Amino acid sequence: MDKIVIKTDNLTKRFGDFIAVDTITFDVKEGEIFGFLGANGAGKTTAMRMLCGLSIPSSGEASIGGFDVYREREKIKKNIGYMSQKFSLYEDLTVAENIRFFGGIYGLDSQNLKIKSQEMIQSLGLESQKNKLVASLPLGWKQKLAFSVSIIHEPKIVFLDEPTGGVDPVTRRQFWDLIYTASERGITIFVTTHYMDEAEYCNRISMMVDGKIKAMDSPANLKSQFSAESMDEVFFELARGAQRKAD
Amino acid sequence: MSNLKFLLQKEFKQIFRNKSLLPLIFVMPIIQLLVMPLAADYEIKNINISIVDHDKSPYSRLLISKITSSGYFKLSDYGESFKAAYDQIEKDKSDLILEIPVDFEKNLVRENSETLFIAVNAINGTKANLGGAYLQQIIGEFNAEVLLQWISPTRYNPSPQIDVASSNWFNPTMNYRFFMVPGILVFLVTMVGAYMCSLNIVKEKEVGTIEQINVTPIKKHEFILGKLIPFWVIGIVVFSIGLFFVARLIYGIVPVGSILLLYGFLAIYLIALLGVGLLISTYSETQQQAMSVAFFVMMIFLLMSGLFTPIESMPTWAKTIAEFNPVTYFIEVMRMVILKGSGFMDVTKHFKIMAAFALFFNTWAILNYRKTS
Amino acid sequence: MRQFFTFVSKEFRHVFRDRKTMLMLFGLPIAQILLFGFALTNEIKDSKIAILDLAKDPASRAIIEKIASSDQFEIASSLQSQAGIEETFKKGSSNLVLVFPVNFNEDLLGQNSVQIQVIADASDPNEANTLTNYINFIVASYQREELVTEAIPLQIITEIRMLYNPELKGATNFVPGVMALVLMLVCTLMTSVSIVREKENGTMEILLVSPMNPFLVIVSKAIPYFILSLVNLTVILLLSIFLLDMPFNGSYFLFYFESSLLIIAALSLGLLISTSTNSQQAAMLISLMGMLVPTMLLTGFMFPLENMPVPLQLISDIIPSRWYYIIAKSIMIKGLGFAAIWKETLILFSMTVFFLTISFKKFNIRLQ
């Protein structure tokens, strides 16, 4: 049996009267690519922020890599990587400086840091851009770099919050190649997206509507369950009943 | 601790890379320190006086020449019409009118008494008060001279005289800039420190990089220290440039007291000040908000610090506000140590209060700064 | 025209939604008026002094009593020896020490002449000067009252009249200055930041591709701040009339007209700043650090301009608020009409036209 690395039980987040995340329960297995889907405002980001230790749940249980989200948030942070839709590198630092900074923060020693950073720059093909400010890179490159930086410390799990917004399908495909490579190394991937073609790349996906998980299975099973041709249809079928308006 | 090293490297790189900010941090304060003390001069001189002389006697002319040679007054207008002189006041060409009545000399000698009329433009109350007082003083001296001319010293038996011998310590040349430069330096260090610190942190919030920091194992205190230390260092550098290059080389101000003492106080002051900056940043979401709040706070700090107007003259409630203003204490310490050579024993109270401020603002800010929601 | 109003109302919403900006916009002027009106004064009051009375006789006691009962002084301590003088200064516990010599009264009456020593802490030379003068004055009045027996012949009496401000209130001088300062700063800062923010967010591009004339876009950004400034001005005016008992002797219409001139000048200055920078941070720092200090110092309400070195006086000539300050004083306090201030108005008007032209020109270049 595969080891479970993310486990939630009736996890809930309330903001006043508004229930942003409503009693969600799911497990994610080690090495899995888990897609977290839903319309804008369905509660994806809030759920993810709770799992990363950025936000304290109102009720329910959750553990990440065996650590509790209430009591062991600092331990969780050592074991996860995170990349958000808001751009998360420093634009006024160079490529190499960003790698060095985040590597240093995660406690890589200088020997290790040098090797890692060399490797990363090489594998991304950024040798000539090494000493350029991140601000001057095209968006697609920034995203790839941000992803590589977020797993520089070989975390157990990496959380990606809409990582590929605003780039063309080819660049997106390249980004997913990076995700697969990471997954093969045993890193669990937890990704939110609203591109349905990306959903197909996941091992398993969950659909969130109005703060609740409405469906959860592999893409193939979901399609047959809703007798749909594509994930798009599955999504429309589920999202049609949504009460909340997208923001 | 190694986290802190990486954070500091990052901050310094970002600060020194920002070409539009650097001159504002280092050049602007220096220029202001060069210019402000030249402008901040309360000394009342060059008072413009209009004289309306209806008498035109030897006495009236003698009085006028005494007034114009006193160094305080500049004769802007001389005539026989009060109306014309009043026009000059309305146009701000003249600050003060002296009206000498018809037969001034004759009446003075014959009736033993005569009245001179003075009208002062009192929109600026302080200036009016002093101008009036100087003029009365000169008239008094003139009166004494006239008296001596008419009454031979033998016949006139003077009453007992009390002579007031005055001396001015610590600033014998009465140079107003010696007083202003240390205070202005404090203010500039304050502006640079508080603004830069609060804006810098809010910028990370606005751009979103703070989220990334929050999911890393960086501890709250490491992040805060990583923000405070660079601005602490910058504050000390700006202060040193001001003290050694501008104050010493340009204005010739050499601290009488211990420089070490000044730096000791500066170190604690900056911690308190950056605590204020941090606090502002925890309450702001955007740079515009941070700037608005910082500006509001700075303005109150500036006005209530005793930099331009004495705290002693304030009403009690305002004195209380001044007592809760960290800037007040640093300005006092600067003036005491630089001009009077006060030692540590003289400013122990200031040290204690500043340490309390530092503790208070930083604790509040840290409690209010949250990594999680 | 409807589009235009849509834009203007959008700008208003931006302003009103941000409470912290509102604090700066309205809180600051109010706080300033209150502080300048009630707390800040150049006058010396309750200044702490120490007394070293080596005589302790009726004459010294009488003079000390006179000093203690004056508004200017507060006797903080009495010293025992010369050595205490330096200490009291270094601790900052008194600003002036008065020394009565031994046998003060005896010498005064016996030898007809005696000396009092006044030692001032001249770190603040103005205060030292003023305090010494007050002491002189008090001693002289003691002499006149107690020691002069016969009437002095040939006496010149002076009758002094304080025009415009008989109670010598500080507010009379400060209020027009604060108005000038607030209008200058708020308008320049707010316009420059609000335009640069749109540039930073990229929304400026969207506005510029809209069917509206680009100049109208800019004008619509300026209008809310123009109106808010007038409201602000009115608040200050009401506070100063009702709370500080300031007079308003001139024409309100003329006053608002002149104020509008200054506001437009400041708004166009803000536009100018916004065209020369791309980051909010830089716009703020230029407007604040670059404008606050010069405006405060060189408008003439804190420090007399005529004392300054000539180069600074020349710089002050190009600061719009300096001319507005003269105009505001003339209208509010002196109650003068347009005839008395047409020159200043002309200067202010030319400045406004100048700034407006340059900023529109620069803005235009950016568009192409």
Image (tube, rainbow, N blue to C red):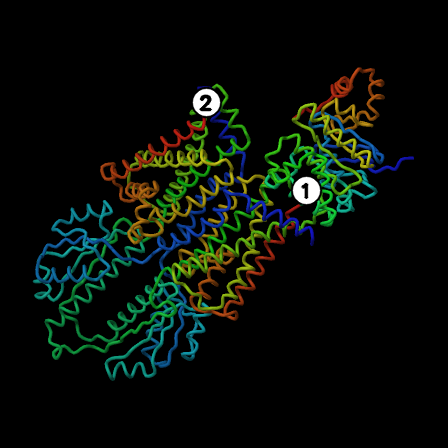
- Reading the image, the residue beneath label 1 is A99
Q: Which residue is depicted at the point 82% across and 28% down?
A: A203
Residue nearest the viewer, comparing C310 with C160: C310
Quadrant (top left, top right, bottom left, bottom right) of the N terminus of chain C: top left
Residue at the front extreme, as displayed = A128
| Placement of C363 over or under C131, stated as above or below | above
Q: In the rendered picture of this protein, how many numbered marks are placed on residues?
A: 2
Q: Splitting the image into 4 quarters, where does residue B66 fall?
A: bottom left
Letter of the chain that mark 1 sits on in the rendering: A
Q: Is residue C363 visible?
A: yes
Q: Is residue B284 left or right of residue C261?
A: right
Q: Are marks 1 and 2 in contact (CB under 8 Å)?
A: no
Letter of the chain that mark 2 sits on in the rendering: C
Q: Is residue B241 left or right of residue B178?
A: right
Amino acid tagged 1: Ile
Q: Residues at marks 1 and 2, common chain?
A: no
- Reading the image, the residue beneath label 2 is C4
Q: Secondary structure at mark 2?
A: helix
In the rendered image, residue C251, in percent from the top left (x then y), is placed at 29, 36
| Placement of A31 over or under B241, stated as above or below | above
Q: Splitting the image into 4 quarters, where does residue B181 fall?
A: bottom left
Q: Secondary structure at mark 1?
A: helix
In the rendered image, residue C72, in percent from the top left (x then y), is placed at 36, 64
Quadrant (top left, top right, bottom left, bottom right) of the C terminus of chain C: top left
- Disc 2 crowd rating (10 Å Cα; few below 14, some 14-19, many 20+) is some
Q: Is residue C71 visible?
A: no
Amino acid tagged 2: Phe
